[in-house]
Image (cartoon, rainbow, N blue to C red):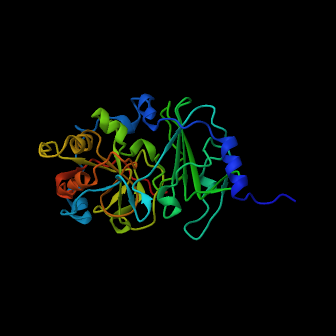
Amino acid sequence: MEHAPGNEDLEQLVEEKEQDPINPGLVEDIAIFPPDHPLNVDISNHTVDQNSDAILHTIGLDVGLFADFGSGTYQGSPIGIPFVAVGGDQPKVAVTFRENNYDGNYGDESDHGPFPIPLDASVEGNGEGDSHVITVDIDNGMLYELYNAEQVGEGWEASSAARFDLKVTAFRPAGWTSADAAGLPIFPLLVRYSEVEKGDIDHPVRFTLERDRIYEGYVHPARHLVSGETGDHLLPFGARLRLKADFDISGFTETNQAILRALKKYGLILADVGSNMFLSGNPDDHWNNDDLKMLGNVRVSDFEVLTLSDIATN
């Protein structure tokens, strides 16, 4: 009878299945979706929704931005959503879908493995909370994301999994979740220090709201909804907030100016339930946490809601 791997067994498995670490900054050298993908489109001239004022009032006009990422640790865990870069020779491992005491089993709305996820890949929150695991295959332009994940035996267990081909403009089936509640990819929407170093963030930024501010529906390119209420004063998954063009960013540091320029050109995109106006990024020891806190001086009243396309409620 086979026995469950102990510590020594697991260390051997990791050694057998892992490749040499790849610099995560290399993700900036690959295309992250084609130029015509909605997540790459300049929205600085898009029209404002007729219910923008009501929606912003519901969120709370005085609520400031909060960078839910940074350097160091918070309660023992790196601050933000981590990812790992791998090459095309990264061995693939099985992903088993299950429910646990944190969330259910969404295997019927998931892509099935095996996936090239290292057994020692970082888990968001060190396994507390959403426990996202993200792997970018830089050789093949593929993205793999797990939600509520845990490394077990020779593979991973998770509540859901999503695979995205970064070389094409394609979307998940309507009504499907991903590793995110809105059915969107997570990695392309993270504020990454490696792109801030270049001075240019060329995509929208993932953000969250509390459930009572969210419309029970979604707009393209989101694919999934969360239960709640409907009304013209609520924001559906996939909706964009755009920082007003006349908002003065000159008093911010170069790092924060790079983030704020992106919020004018690509906006914020609602992707999950969470704390109000929390922005997602990756942990990096180069972040200046005190500087990132200055983003709190940017308020909801400084934004506008872009025109919402047809809201899906299925």
On the rendered image, what quadrant is the N terminus found in?
Answer: bottom right
Quadrant of the image occupied by residue 265: top left
Asked if residue 248 is positioned above or below residue 78 in the image, the reply reads above
Residue at the farthest right position = 1
Q: Quadrant of residue 142?
A: top right
Q: Residue 94: where, in percent of width, then height?
A: 69, 48
Residue 31 in percent (x, y) is at 44, 29
Give residue 124's position: percent from left, percent from top: 48, 56
Residue 153 shows up from this direction? no
15 or 303, nearer to the observer: 15
Horizontal side of residue 40 vs 12, given as left or right: left
Report the number of discs: 0
Residue at x 39% of width, y 29% of height: 35
Compare residues 205 and 23 and report the one nearer the observer. 23
* Picture residue at 12% right of the left edge, 42% below the top: 250
Tell whether 222 sits left or right of 148. Answer: left
Residue 15 appears in the figure: yes
Residue furthest to the bottom in view is 101
Q: Position of residue 277 (x, y in %)?
A: 30, 58
* Residue shown at 35% from the left, 53% from the top: 69
